[in-house]
Amino acid sequence: MSNNTLYLKAAEQFRRNPGQRAAYESGGHCVVIAGPGSGKTKTLTVKLARILAEDVHEPRGVACITYNNECARELENRLEALGVEPGRRVFIGTVHSFSLTQIVLPYAKSAHLELPNEFCVATRTERARALERAYNRAIGGPENPQNWDLRMTNYRRSILDRNSEEWRSRNPELAQLVEAYEEELRAMDRIDFDDMPLLAVRALRENVSA
């Protein structure tokens, strides 16, 4: 049996399970809810192989976003058993990895993300240094700047549109701190972990018609 039809043999087992069969054959949004060991991962990988063989053709591909790297490795192993190897047409990884490798790195310039030419991900020490400098610029005072880290992180994640009135008005102090912190990171040629999905969302939002 050739690699591109191995999924058909695997899918035969779904005939005994109507739920798996329905998920495998679904063409739109589909949520699979089942307990551990019930075959969710198998259903996902066989369906992914089918999509690549029947629905998504060259040069288009498929992205499979997972919770962590361990899940990604499990999916890769199962797909390889079906003759599907991660590569140009298949991405398997976390949302942060997808955001960085598939959107931010290849499209930073064309999407006008205003990132340094050569940037990398900040270490914990570099993040702390950037926050300290940002705190002194935007807020000041005797408090430990690191006490603001969680509040700043939550604010960055909660309002995605930096041009909105909500960004400025909900908490002007935190808005100024976030912007100063990100400026400090960029001055160091750095982005941080949260930057990855935030920059990816910004690139997609601001370049809808591109």
Image (cartoon, rainbow, N blue to C red):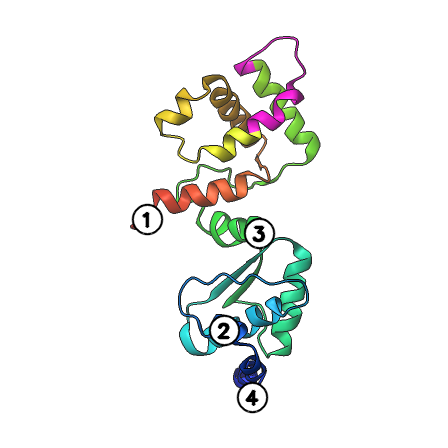
Badge 2 amino acid: Tyr
Question: SS of the residue at dot 1?
Answer: loop
Q: Nearer the viewer, mark 3 or mark 2?
A: 2
Q: Which mark is residue 24?
A: 2
Instruction: Inspect the magenta stretch and tell me whether residue 145 lies in it.
Output: yes
**Whether label 3 touches label 4, CB < 8 Å:** no
Which residue in the protein does label 1 denote? 208
Decide which of tag 3 and tag 1 comes sooner along the chain.
Answer: 3
| Quadrant for the N terminus in the image | bottom right
Which residue in the protein does label 3 denote? 97
Q: What residue lies at 45% left-to-right and 75% top-to-bottom?
A: 25
In the rendering, at what x and y percent does residue 125 appear? 70, 30
Distance from the alpha carbon under mark 3 to that under mark 1: 21 Å
Distance from the alpha carbon under mark 2 to that under mark 4: 20 Å
Can residue 110 be seen from the camera position used here?
no
Question: SS of the residue at dot 3?
Answer: helix
Distance from the alpha carbon under mark 1 to that under mark 4: 39 Å
Distance from the alpha carbon under mark 3 to that under mark 4: 31 Å
Q: Nearer the viewer, mark 1 or mark 2?
A: 2
> Over which residues does the magenta segment extend?
137-152
